[in-house]
Image (cartoon, grey):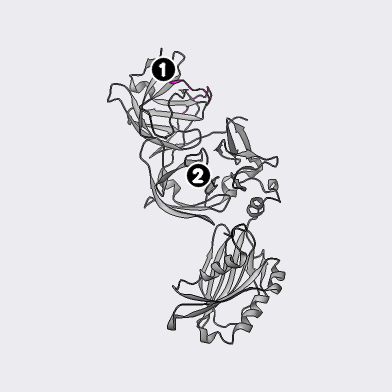
Amino acid sequence: MSKRLHLTFVLALILCLSLTACGSDNDLASPDEVAKGNELVTDMAFLDGMWSNDGLSMLYFNSDGGYYVYHSTYGPTGRGEFTDETGKPMINYGGFLYDFYLRDDGVLLPNQNGEGGDTPDIDHHTFRRDNEAEICLWELDNYDGMWQNAAGETIVIDASLSEYTACSSKYSSSGTIGDEEQGRGLYLYDDGSRAYICPSADGNSFTISSGFAGRYSEDGHFDGVFYRDGDIEAYTDLSNAEFYYDFWQWYFDGVNDYCLGDDYEVREDGLAYHVKDGKVYPAGWIPEERYDPADDWGEQFAADKILVLTGGVLPFTNIQNLSSDNNPDGTYYYEDVTEDGLIVVNIAEQSCFEPDVQDMEDYLTACVLSLSDADTYELLSAEENEEYSENLSYPVYIVKYTAGDGEDTRRWIVFATDTDNYTYLYGFCEAPDAAEDMDETYQSIFAQLYLSDEG
């Protein structure tokens, strides 16, 4: 399958630069070949314009502006310094200086000066002048806002502060966004490491690479494609989505191509994935009809929205809403208060339950205890209710505890269940002396709860 690369190069202005493609990503020159019998390039202006390796990795030079732009095959793209202060044109890429040799057949050979380190390099790659290739280099402002991948993992970028927050069901982090202007582009600085943003051609999606082509981590966190506002339908054409192999594994979502590297496999149903510790991590969105019903990931991500835990009309008067948060992945947090100060919460979160290492009762109890931010608590009871479990077809536990000290003490009674993909909590919080006669009312409410797809 041929590449569908159509890359837009955006700086302060949008530059449309054309080049031709020939050669191969496997077409590498040996270290001895670079200098031997080839001409050292000494004219900086000679390099101006676009060079590419089969339209995959690309180099653009601008001698007047004193910069170059490099697009790696697997996505990271950035600009850096281009000078000729040593009497020959050189670039600084990833902390290393490169000069260039020209082969008799017009092939440009970058030559790394110095050795060491684990920085990906462009040393000995072959580049030819290209009249069709274009590079996509978006500035930070383009990434401002919320982004989400197929697993519901979310990254929120504040361009004005050069900061980001990332969260999933099992991981969260925050940090700064930087660019050393060494040709590798924008990166998320995460606990001492750098995760480079790999922009799509239209600037509405990206992957993240941190030591892996097309991948962020070994265990699958933050892999795959992140879409603006998590709006997959607005930025793809899933009827034409597919995975294909061309030296590396690629994913085409009907609009853009994404390099997934060499650690993915494609099943017969068209899902590209890699496996870590027995778990399947999807590469990106695929058409709903291609999901394998037996695959937990497919079952979860094929749904447009999650079920909502709901019931009858509450038997309270003058209820006011304190919080109503509906997240892009379908999870939610609702909190109401009655005129007597009774707090009512209804919450759905991504499940963090690990069957092999956790007990369901312990897991749900811990989730319920986290509802209070008090420093002290006393667990009164945590028991499975067989009637409620039968109603939902999932195990339901009723957890009771007190939290806080003195006049700040509050009693919680919470209906808690987990559906493998989501954890649901529905509960009440009030002063202990007001709770004595309310248990029957709460149990009546719990008995009416069910999971609805009409929330």
Quadrant containing the N terminus is top right
> Which residue sits at x=41%, y=39%?
185
Specify the segment rendered in magenta.
18-32
Where disc 1 sits, the SS reads: strand
Q: Which residue is mark 1?
A: 102
Count of marks overlaid on the render: 2
Pick the front one: 317 or 173: 173
Q: Is 445 rendered above or below residue 269?
A: below
Residue 249 shown in magenta: no
Res. 216 mark: 2
Q: Is 376 rendered above or below residue 210?
A: below
> Which residue sits at x=63%, y=74%?
383
> Which residue sits at x=58%, y=82%?
316
Pick the front one: 255 or 291: 291
> Which residue sits at x=53%, y=72%?
335
Disc 2: CA contacts within 10 A as few (<14), some (14-19) or many (>=20): many
Where disc 2 sits, the SS reads: loop
The residue type indicated by label 2 comes to Tyr
Pick the front one: 227 or 172: 172
Residue 393 in view, yes or no: yes
Spot occupied by residue 409 in the image (x, y as percentages of width and height): 47, 80
